[in-house]
């Protein structure tokens, strides 16, 4: 029974990590947010354009954004395929009701218990 529980927990870990980073994002807790990502995380804009490399660069990208008191994101839909979590996310930069949301798809690839790669697909991305 314990082995089955361990397997189920391991299968959920990428989803749990994606949820943990989303909660840290909504709390605007930069330290907790950055801790979800690998030191050598790679962030790509669709279709495979490297936007930045490394946790510190990733962290720097969010410093100003996390100052917005209304910042909020939800996972509209989440699918987990192996070590990948695919989220349809809706983000309000100034809070629901104060600005139009941004819809995007984010693919989180987990390695060794941390998010090692992030792929953003935003409205207006090249086809």
Image (cartoon, rainbow, N blue to C red):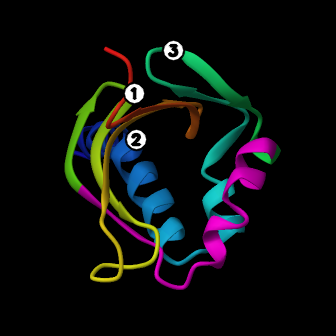
Percent across and percent down for residue 14 are 40, 41
In the picture of the structure, the residue carrying the numbered disc 3 is 48
Q: Is residue 14 magenta?
A: no
Percent across and percent down for residue 92 are 38, 68
Q: Label 3 crowding class (10 Å Cα cut-off): few <14, some 14-19, many 20+?
A: few
Q: Nearer the viewer, residue 41 or 101?
A: 101
- Report helix, strand or loop for mark 3: loop
Number of callouts: 3
Is 109 placed above or below 104 here?
A: above
Among the two numbered marks 3 and 2 on one chain, the one whose residue lies closer to the N terminus: 2
Circle number at residue 83: 1
The residue sitting at 52% across, 66% down in the picture is 25
Percent across and percent down for residue 18 are 42, 50
Which quadrant is the C terminus positioned in? top left
Evaluate if marks 1 and 2 touch, with contact meaning CB atoms under 8 Å apart. Answer: yes
Q: Quadrant of residue 84?
A: top left
The residue sitting at 30% across, 63% down in the picture is 101
Q: Nearer the viewer, residue 25 or 36?
A: 25
Instruction: Give, as a single range, the part of the protein colored magenta.
Output: 57-75
The residue sitting at 26% across, 42% down in the picture is 8
User: What is the spatial separation of the Cα atoms under label 3 and label 2, in whole angstroms?
Assistant: 21 Å
Among the two numbered marks 1 and 2 on one chain, the one whose residue lies closer to the N terminus: 2
- Report helix, strand or loop for mark 1: loop
**33 horizontally vs 120: left or right:** right
In the picture of the structure, the residue carrying the numbered disc 2 is 14
Which quadrant is the N terminus positioned in? top left
Q: Nearer the viewer, residue 42 or 69?
A: 69
- Report helix, strand or loop for mark 2: helix
Is 16 placed above or below 85 here?
A: below
User: What is the spatial separation of the Cα atoms under label 1 and label 3, in whole angstroms?
Assistant: 18 Å
Percent across and percent down for residue 40 are 75, 30
User: What is the spatial separation of the Cα atoms under label 1 and label 2, in whole angstroms?
Assistant: 6 Å
């Amino acid at each position: 029974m314990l082995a089955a529980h361990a397997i189920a927990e391991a299968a959920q870990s990428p989803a749990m990590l994606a949820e943990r980073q989303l909660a840290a994002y909504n709390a605007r807790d930069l330290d907790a947010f950055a801790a979800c990502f690998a030191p050598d995380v790679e962030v790509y804009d669709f279709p495979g354009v490297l936007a930045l490399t490394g946790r510190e660069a990733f962290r720097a990208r969010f410093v100003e954004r996390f100052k917005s008191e209304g910042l909020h994101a939800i996972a509209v839909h989440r699918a987990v395929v192996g070590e990948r979590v695919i989220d349809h996310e809706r983000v309000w930069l100034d809070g629901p009701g104060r600005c139009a949301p941004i819809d995007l798809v984010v693919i989180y690839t987990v390695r060794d218990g941390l998010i090692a790669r992030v792929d953003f697909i935003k409205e207006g991305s090249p086809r």
